[in-house]
Image (spheres, rainbow, N blue to C red):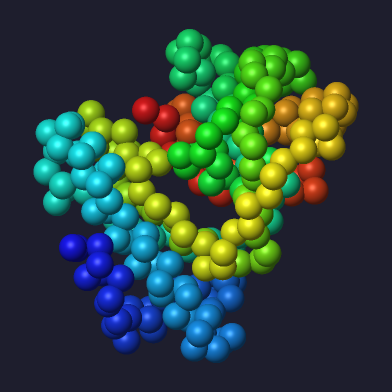
Amino acid sequence: MIQDAILEMKAPFQLMSELKYKMRSSKLCWPGDEGEERWNQAWQAIKKVWASKWNERAYVSCRKAKLNHDDLCMAVLVQEVINADYAFVSHTRNPISGNPSEIYTEIVKGLGETLVGAYPGRAMSFTTKKSALQSPNIISYPSKPVGMFIKKSLIFRSDSNGEDLEGYAGAGLYDSVTMDKMEKVVLDYSCDPLIWDKSYQQSIFKRIAEAGKIVEGIFGSAQDIEGVVKDAEIYIVQTRPQI
């Protein structure tokens, strides 16, 4: 299989040298500085992202959309993992109603893998009018049974042109892989301030909506935004035009 062949590949010296330079110049830690084993972990994660281009679900989706699979190009985005308290996805044009004056957000406890991956349960969701950012409207409460957490690490994210191909929704079909293993934790929502602390909840929801409005203003169009919350601070990890 193609995936198996990719996972057996050795890192070309030129690629490794270029990656080392790019990571250090971006103030990211180079895994090789911690020993050969750490670099091998990083390289394995990179290969898993590349190999996900040929996963069955993505291939079948291409066929259904009548797209040439060779037209899909995969890049790997390297980022430092923020050990998030929460992760969210915001659409700055409500994708359910199509209302451009309303932001729709889904948020989960821990890292975003339980939100964008095929994990059971429902995320907490809310909408926010752009004219009233301080007054979010809760749509649903969470039922995700587990959250994913990790120590300080790197994540290698799939960054394909699948979101840009007409008639093809590529988001979520390809893998993003952390260098270190994530920990799966059973959640107890009775201890979650996002559920029981109204003041904290309102503050977090307002900050997420404010960030979404700012990002949309910068790019001049509706955005599909991924972000995290850590110690009540908002971090944007990725944004793309909303389709």
Where residue 101 sits, quadrant-wise, is: top right
Count of numbered labels shown in the rendering: 0
Please give the name of the residue rendered at 69% of the width and 17% of the height, measured from the top-left corner. Answer: 138
Q: Position of residue 29 (x, y in %)?
A: 58, 76
What residue is shown at x 52% (from left), y 62% (from top)?
178
The residue that appears at 55% across and 89% down in the rendered structure is 35
Q: Residue at x 35, y 67 (%)?
A: 47
Whole-percent x, y for residue 185 in the image: 68, 49
> Can the viewer see residue 150?
yes
Left or right of 214? Residue 172 is left
Q: Quadrant of the C terminus?
A: top left
- Is 145 positioned to the left or the right of 232 in the image? left
Q: Quadrant of residue 89?
A: top right
Location of residue 67 in the rendering, given as x and y in whole percent from the top left corner: 14, 38
Q: Residue 93: x and y, percent?
A: 50, 21
| Residue 212 vs residue 191, the one in the foreground | 191
Where, quadrant-wise, is the N terminus in this rendering?
bottom left
Q: Is residue 181 above or below residue 222?
A: below
| Left or right: 230, with 82 as reference point | right
Instruction: Give the answer, above or below, for where 85 lies relative to 37.
Output: above
> Does the rendering let one see residue 128?
no
Work out whether 50 lies above or below 5.
above
